[in-house]
Amino acid sequence: MIPLEDNVGDIIGKAQRGLGISDSKLAEKARVSSETIRKLREGDFDESALVSVAPILGLNGRALCELARDEWHPEKIEACDGLSQFNTDYHGMAVNAYLVWDPASRAAATFDTGADCDDIVRFVNRHKLDVQLILLTHAHADHVADLPRLREETGAEVFTPAREPVPGAEPIEEGKRFRLGSLQIDTRLTWGHSQGGMTYVVAGLARPVAIVGDSLFAGSMGGGNVSYADALRNNLEKILTLPDETIICPGHGPMTTVGEEKQHNPFFAGKV
Ligand SMILES: [Fe+2]
């Protein structure tokens, strides 16, 4: 089982950086010591301190405590014909890439490349898939690391968000629609973690699937490096409004669903 990408300390750190709230400011507002804040970020489980800092950081206290107690992990997504996750190691950090295919025509698309596309290429050959598209969620190095080789192995066309140009990839804007056999892939701009982060929503499989890159993680989200406020808003408006059964495929950590994130993600629980 792939572990959650972020622990409670990471989540508090991301919210603090996103909102520009220093340790001393947070301590003052939550009426706890700066030392307590530092300990929370190091993973020290102090339920009353967590409940005090949560509202100041716009986080859901119940969901934070649940994660701190290790009480929640998204339910394992049952193997689904048409979707596969590939988890590779990029300089000590695990990164995900995905394959989606139309079970009838075998037309396939990969989403990002991961650190190394060996497993993807092997899977494609074993299952006789025809990779027609390589769709990039964003251009951070860990997500596009093996692009030259994946393109050469598959001969597929490559598309990247227009705001994040990648050599040899065709730029796309929000609203661009792809067809893959009988599947339809729509694009939603979910920037904030990166300048042009794109979410790809696939329709036509047994359940809807959203490949979200680092916009959203199971129980967390990518750091709002470009705009924390827009990252939050885009996740709420463009991902968590999808049907509850939608499978979310994040760039790091396990797969999850819209329904689970609405309940258990401290950034969003109680807001949708
Ligand atoms: Fe990223």
Image (cartoon, grey):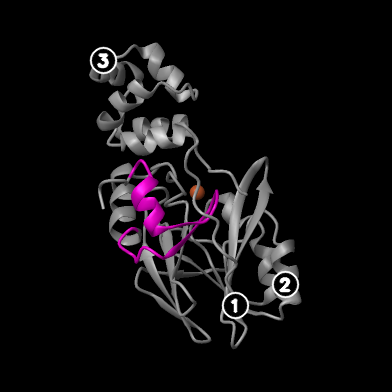
The residue that appears at 49% across and 25% down in the rendered structure is 43
Q: Earlier in the sequence, mark 3 or mark 1?
A: 3
Q: In this figure, which residue is indicated by the disc labeled 3?
A: 31
- Check mark 2 vs ligand 1: CB closer than 8 Å? yes or no: no
How far apart marks 3 and 2 lie (CA) works out to: 58 Å
Residue 248 falls within the magenta-colored stretch:
yes
Q: Secondary structure at mark 3?
A: loop
**Rendered view: 19 above or below 247:** above
The residue that appears at 39% across and 75% down in the rendered structure is 176
How far apart marks 3 and 1 lie (CA) works out to: 54 Å
Say which amino acid is labelled 2.
Answer: Glu
* Magenta span of residues: 240-267
Left or right relative to 187: residue 126: right
Question: How many numbered discs, if any?
Answer: 3
The residue that appears at 51% across and 54% down in the rendered structure is 75
- Check mark 1 vs ligand 1: CB closer than 8 Å? yes or no: no
Q: Nearer the viewer, residue 53 or 216?
A: 53
Residue 6 falls within the magenta-colored stretch:
no
Expressed as whole percent of the image width and height from the top left, the position of residue 9 reads 46, 29
Q: In this figure, which residue is indicated by the disc labeled 1?
A: 108
Q: Nearer the viewer, residue 234 or 126?
A: 126
Expressed as whole percent of the image width and height from the top left, the position of residue 255 reads 52, 56
- Check mark 3 vs ligand 1: CB closer than 8 Å? yes or no: no
Is the C-beta separation of discs 1 and 2 under 8 Å?
no
Q: In this figure, which residue is indicated by the disc labeled 2?
A: 153
**Of tags 3 and 2, which is closer to the observer?**
3
